[in-house]
Amino acid sequence: PRLGIPSITMQDGPQGFRTNDARLVGTVTCLPSQLAVGATWDRELTYAYARALGEEFRAKGANVILGPGLNLGRVARNGRAAEYMSGEDPNLGAVLGGEYVRGVQSAGVAAVAKHFVANTQETDRDTVNSVISERALREVYYLPFEAAVHAGVASIMCSCALPATAARRLDHSRCAHLHLTCSRPVPGVWNLS
């Protein structure tokens, strides 16, 4: 406060502003899932959807939205499949993810792309081991996130942002602590400084 730096007020809400505040319950808009938006393949609609989200989040006092969901829905029974606008297509996620980022951020709300990367199932989420080749990561899984970065996304949430005691793994390493997963691809592969 004394330095004039605003507080970060982030809110989850893949389909709208999610709240536990009794004063706001019943006052938020429940929008279609991001998977439904992805199914339209419509860039303008995605931008408008995201702009509406951003405007509502801003009106409710949030300046950060935990979205878009850009992970690939590789397992149909994944409990989070409806959160990912990419569906199974990284190119779709790349095109629409950028529109989502631009739409939300045009309303003055920072977008956080999630869940980087290979968050393919909720069953045994704390112990699952996703074994994925470097080539598949680069050609399939990273693409939507790379597009979000180039669209100016404010941040990226690691899929494994779990406590250090959690054991979610990518190629046998804890994801949140894995240099390969959470830091090397962004500056190294995507030619960013």
Image (cartoon, rainbow, N blue to C red):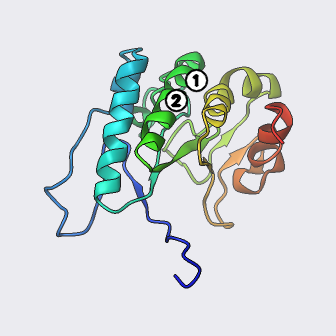
Q: Nearer the viewer, residue 36 or 43?
A: 43
**Which x, y percent locates residue 92?**
52, 18
Can residue 173 be seen at all in this image of the molecule? Answer: yes
Q: Nearer the viewer, residue 109 or 164?
A: 109
Can residue 75 be seen at all in this image of the molecule? Answer: no
Q: Nearer the viewer, residue 165 or 143?
A: 143
The picture quadrant where one finds residue 72 is top right
Secondary structure under tag 2 reads: helix
Numbered circle sitting on residue 44: none
Please tell me how crowded label 1 is: few (under 14), some (14-19), or many (20+) other residues with Cα within 10 Å. Answer: many
The picture quadrant where one finds residue 34 is top left
Q: Residue at 44% across / 58% down in the picture?
A: 63
Say left or right for 65 vs 174.
left
Say left or right for 172 vs 49.
right
For the residue marked with disc 2, what is the amino acid? Gly
**Which x, y percent locates residue 94?**
58, 23
Secondary structure under tag 1 reads: helix
For the residue marked with disc 1, what is the amino acid? Ala
Which residue position holds label 1?
94
**Which x, y percent locates residue 118?**
63, 36
| Distance between the alpha carbons at the discs numbered 1 and 2 | 5 Å
Q: Residue at 40% across / 28% down in the picture?
A: 47
Which residue position holds label 2?
97
Say left or right for 82 vs 114.
left
Whether label 1 touches label 2, CB < 8 Å:
yes
Q: Residue at 55% across / 43% down in the picture?
A: 114
